[in-house]
Image (spheres, coloured by chain):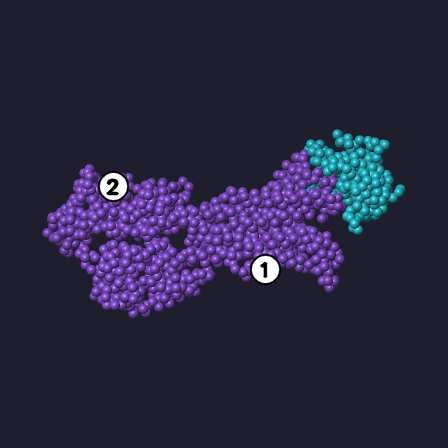
Chain colours: A purple, B cyan
Amino acid sequence: MTAAWAREVPALALHRARAQAPLLAAVTATALVALTVLATCGLLLTAGRRDALDAALAAAGTGGTQVVARVVPPAGAVAADAGALVPEVTAVAADALAPLPATVSTWTESPLLALPEDGSEDPGYAYLTDAADLAGAARLVEGAWPDAAAAGGSGPVDVALPAATAAALGLAPGDALDLAPSPDAPAAADRTAVRVVGVFQPLHRGDAGTPVWARDLLGGAGVDPGHARPGTSGRQQSPAYGPLVVAPGALASAGTGVGVVTVALRPDPAGASVAALREAAEGVARLRPALADALGERADRTVVRTSFPATARATATQHAVAGAAVLTAGLVGVALAAAALLLAGRLLAARRGPERALLLDRGAGRRQLLGLAGAEAAAVVGVAGVLAVPLALAAYRALAAVPLVAGAGIAPPEGVPGSLVATVGVGAVGLVLALVAPAARRPGARRATGPSRLARSGGDLLLVAVAVLAALRLRSDAPADAVRVLAPVLALVAASVLVLRVVPLLGGAAERGARRSRRFVLPLAALDAARRPRAAVALLLLVLAAAGATFGAGWAATWSRSQAEQAEALVPAAVVASDVPGSPTAQGVLVRDAARGAALPVTDRGTGFGTLVASGPDEAQPRLLAVDTGAAELTGRLPDGTTWAGLTAGLPPADGELVAALPVRAEGGDLAVRLSGTTGSEHPMSVTPALVVDDGHGVRVRALGDRVPLDGAERVVDLATPGGFVAPDGGARVLAVVLRVHTDVVLDEGVGGVADVAVRVAWDPPPGAGDAAGAGPWSARPTAATAENQSLSRPEVEVGPDGVSATGEVDVSRASYLPTVAVLTSFAPTAPLPVVVTEDLAAGAGLRVGDPLEVAVGGASLPAAVAAVAPYLPGAADRPAVLADLRALSRAAIAEAETAPLVDAWWLPADADVDALRDAGAQVTSRAAVAGDLAAGPLRVGVLAALGLLVVAAVALALVGTALHAAETAEDRGPEVARLLAVGASPRAVAGTYVVQHVVVDLLAVAAGTAAGAVVARALAPALTISATGGRPVPEALPVWSWPAAGTIAALLLAGSAAVVLPATAALVRRASAAHLRLGDAT
Amino acid sequence: MTGVTGVAGVPATAGEGAGTAAPDAGAPLVRVRGVHRTYGSGRAAVHALRGVDLDVAPGELVALVGRSGSGKTTLLNVVGGLDRPDAGSVHVDGTDVATLDAAGQVRLRRDVVAFVFQTFGLVPVLSAAENVAVPLRLRALPVADRERRVALLLRLVGLDGHAALRPDELSGGQQQRVAIARALAGSPRLLIADEPTGQLDTETGLAVMALIRAVVEAEGMAAVVSTHDPVMIGLADRAVRLVDGRVLPA
């Protein structure tokens, strides 16, 4: 038989293929759709994620990947020392970044050098920098860049300096400057002469994409009025200016010595695997100790600045989540494809039942028949596989042509990727097995036995239990990548299996109704549906397709909504401008012009909270936010019943201090006071005044005066406002006066006793100012430090229209060690500053509403009290933070003589002229742009693309499966239809019976599948939604159910099903003939 | 198997006069003249019927005899309106079946003719009672009347204790009796049975044949039964032999 069989098989197979060509074509089409879906998912998972990963790393830019190592050699280091350090630092850093290649650039800074005496108390320090890479990071605004060819001579060193430095030092091209050694620069020449040849404007200072200025000592600011003074270990502060950029290579010949060697490595992660990224990130995280070990005594201090580990972490997480989405789509697609192919296999087996029985009767073995079925299945799937490769490439090209996907850097591959062929090959093997499986079944083994039903029930329960466990694990804090993939797939399959158990239960009700009816069509359809449930595989196909597609749509909706909410939380206003050049009042003029007046000054800086120690990476440093909470419209979703207005209601002070503030003439930005004072002490004493001046728009700056002896004489004291003071509308007002009283000799404790001190500070009011303000509620008090030092008692203030007079009793000896500070304010003494704290901060510090805490601002710790606890704060969504009202914060800071400006950024409306702000050098962040980035980030688009593919694949495979099932049904029902026609049923009634049955069951299946998809989406979509940094989104993602999407999917499935069933049923009735009447039920 | 006693005692359903009217002694209920039926064409053509003539009188039980492929089933299908002749005429109860439109054929099968098949022809998902009720549902008979009629018919065929069982829970003979009950449900004037005992053992077949004989007599209908079974032939009023699509002279 074997030899004969071998001879017969080809002819038999060929003959059968000819005879059953339409059926084989349908099966081939099914396999083709399944393999195409699978291969497209495979491409998205491999080539697509590869492209997206590269694009994501490229989008992270230099700021996200650059590694900056600042090495401070021991004091006295010279150029040769720096020259020796550079290759070593480079080698260690490159080793840390391995296996990623990197490009290296080096900056060398001089130590801080003393500026020449200019008559002021502290002229400050400056430094020289030999900087590479400045071309794209600075714009020359005046003069020229230093010429390398002219460097090295005996003359002055040519330098270019930032505009802010030039303005602060009053320098312009052509000016010269002599710098002297400082305690930090013992190796410097006695005199370093520099000549200004150019002035430049640093660009992109705060821009994460080009963070060149992160290498600079002052970050490109040009001026730091409170920099750590050399030789004091940071205990004292002095102004610092720079960088004074020399020609490349010129620092060595300048004779200043070397203060800092900065090596910046820019890794090239293109083509790198996630594992390589992680390895490099781990190396970079260990770079600082590695440098310390390698350099030993040759480095005094080493600082590593980089966001690379965070970028790698975020990218890897997004990569995993995108992969999870693609794999979810792929696995659901595989399940649907397997179900469709099982149906196809069953259809083939049903059609060939008689033939099989005949062959068995003729002596063919089951194994031989199985071999024949396998060969035929291999041929069918082989044809489908060959066609699937170009079809999947075409589908992937179409996907990559979608603007959102193309924008994410996902491009069609060149040629045919090996992974595509491999995917199709593996899928083909699976499909062959699915096709052959029904043929392997023993004849008559269609009904499940009791034990097998029990086993199936147990399997279902086990599946549900595993799915629940996976879902719980997914919702935990740090799910593994495998959980991200498996949890949604398991949940979908388990939910669909549960639904399969529930849908037939509805048949009982339909059956009871049918029995009570006298009609034919609906009752017979109901009885049929109730007693002959659709084949489990066919029903599973429809349920799983509906569940998978609606879950995909739900996840996509949840994802998109969350990205928009995250953007709202990350960017607290429509437009946020930071690093605006100039003093706060000058900034105010610029931003108000750009925003047509609607700009709010904001404090946004790192801070500390009493003894609470912030741990973790730099990006987790607590933030202090302050804004006019009455004017700002805080957005971002809060828990039900909570509003930002409610949370911030208690923050602003009840009164407006400007009512009592005293007008001051500030024409041209020049401020001056007339100061006189007396002391009852026999020891010489002096006072240093500082005024807090408001520009009339809520922006306040400090105006610092020089120290004046308390000798009774009135002196005119010019006030310095760093960066200048601008009050364009003439609305300048003095809010407060801070007087620092010094004893000019050092006295032992108790010597000198207590002396009466009186100080009058007067100024010129603007023309036309009345004297009504003189009656304002000014008050005088010591700062907390002075009060603790017990060096001031009975402070009082009298106010006139043109100044204030303060009196008090000062402990003379204590004022010789620590200035006695009296604060005269136009507002009443402040209660603890009311603040809103974030939940994580409250939890970390054990804070509850009403609890006290201290907020660090500048050098002061301000007493504060928790007014409310918020889940997060806009603008500081990913870290602990505290929010205060800017006026209340200003009052609290002034009360502690902390008069430094509080304006760090500006909140502007959406229609602000961002181009003008950017042209001025400000960093501008738009909420809309951030939302766009979040929604369309390269790896994030992959999620949406995969979910879109899931929806399309589910619908396509469900319809293919429905068509196959309809064909199978038609095959089964021919005799039955003929019998019903024979007993007098009209063709229309018979067709109606089957159509109603299909429609009702499909409707139930689609509805149940949609419900299952909704449940899974509600349970898992928020846990599958991540932030840009790969963490949990803030605010917490809420499940979003898109009725239009779900409705469209259900309608597509039902319409498609109807489109398949109606012609199939019509054909069934049409073809039912008397011949069927001679066929038994077995067929 | 239950016997067929009591068949004669089953009353005709009120209002179903079409099935119980006394036949016109002068006109045959079935009149077939010169019927031809060919399947396929050219060399592959199969001439199933070649000028068949046949009359069946009301109340008459005719056995259609012949070898397989002789045209018995084709003739039954043509008479029952399940197939159309290529030529010739077929009148059933005075209606030209060959010229009926689709609706007319449906009415014919619903009101005049009933079938009993060799393979029983029951709807597998319906119980015995529900199968019997199908023709009554097609007539939208009130539920109470339908249930009463079904109970009577099941009692007629000796299956009143099996009403709730489905076909796969019944023996072959029981299924065929359900099929007969269903055929009777619409009170037809003509019963067409295509080898009704073909899949039954001898004893069961005998019982089924006796049942058919009994109901034909009890209901006053005509019946045409194709069969190879000499017992059945013996129970018939007369036998008509078909050979190669032609009726042999008696």
Question: Residue A349: x and y, percent?
Answer: 68, 53
Query: Is A643 placed left or right of A260 in the picture?
Result: right
Viewer can see residue A755:
no
Instruction: Check disc 1 and report the residue beneath it.
Output: A425
Question: Residue A422: x and y, percent?
Answer: 56, 60
The quadrant of the picture occupied by the N terminus of chain A is bottom right
Q: Identify the residue at horizontal 23%, vertical 46% (top origin).
A: A693
Toward the viewer: A406 or A889?
A: A406
Q: Identify the residue at horizontal 83%, vertical 39% (top origin).
A: B33
Q: Identify the residue at horizontal 37%, vertical 64% (top origin).
A: A104
Viewer can see residue A608:
yes
Instruction: Check disc 2 and report the residue beneath it.
Output: A658
For residue B72, above or below residue A207? above
Q: Which chain's residue wears label 1?
A: A
- Give the residue type at disc 2: Leu
- What is the secondary structure assignment of the residue under circle 1? helix
